[in-house]
Image (cartoon, rainbow, N blue to C red):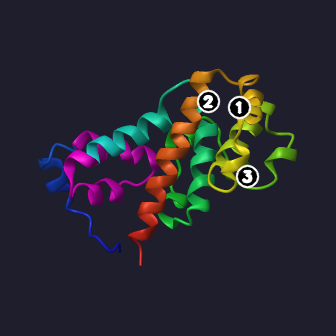
Amino acid sequence: MTLIDPVDRSQAEEQGLRSRLDSFTGLGDESATFIRILARAPGYAEALWDAMAEALFEGNVDHALKEIIRIQLANKAEDPYFSSLRSKKALESGLTEERIAAGQGDFLNDTQFTDAEKWALDYAYRMYRTPETVDAAFYDEGKQLWSEAQIMEIGGLVAIHYGLQTFMRTLQP
């Protein structure tokens, strides 16, 4: 249970959130608990989930890599809810728990990750641990591996997901 109870699914649907509830199941939570909590402020529920979903499921960065980053951030946020969710799309593409775990560990020295993947994982890692190291030299390195649009995509994913995962953690006793 959370400190703010989720609304009933039917109430969330009446507020026009059916498509958001349905799309949230892509993360493996058939009850869409997070959306149903946000449904207490329906406009926010729409905007926040749309931003989260866009950052995770759309764009030009591999979805499975973004899923590893999302879980890395949820673990950093100490959020058991988002830490336990798994994207069905990523799992169907072959993402394994072993690769997820590798993305939480010594990924910089793990040969299963490309240099581009290592940079993205490091970017997410640094943003909330050592943000002072995300400097011009770090971005210059990233620009050798990713387009500027992809760097924005990764940065947006990090900012949106970590913030909302931290928020969700505060709602759990």
Tag 3, which secondary structure?
helix
Q: Amino acid at mark 3?
A: Glu
Q: Name the quarter where the C terminus is drawn.
A: bottom left
Q: Which residue is mark 3?
A: 98
Q: Which residue is mark 1?
A: 139
Name the residue rendered at 63%, 48% in the picture: 127
Q: Is residue 100 above or below residue 1?
A: above
Q: Tell me where residue 135 appears, x and y as whole percent.
A: 71, 39
Q: Which residues are magenta?
A: 18-44
The label nearer to you, 1 versus 2, is 1
Mark 1 surroundings within 10 Å by alpha-carbon count, few (fewer than 14), some (14 through 19), many (20 or more): some
Q: Nearer the viewer, residue 77 or 128?
A: 128
**Left/right of residue 42 with respect to residue 14 in the rendered view:** right
The answer to whether residue 61 is seen in the rendering is no
Q: Amino acid at mark 1?
A: Tyr
Report the predominant secondary structure element of the magenta stretch: helix
Q: Is residue 168 above or below residue 142?
A: below
Q: Residue furthest bottom?
A: 173
Tell me whether circle 1 and circle 2 mark residues in contact (CB < 8 Å): yes
Q: Tell me where residue 19 appears, x and y as whole percent.
A: 26, 39
Name the residue rendered at 19%, 52% in the picture: 12
Q: Which residue is mark 2?
A: 151
Q: Is residue 23 magenta?
A: yes
Q: Tell me where residue 151 appears, x and y as whole percent.
A: 61, 30
Q: Amino acid at mark 2?
A: Ile
Residue 78 image label: none
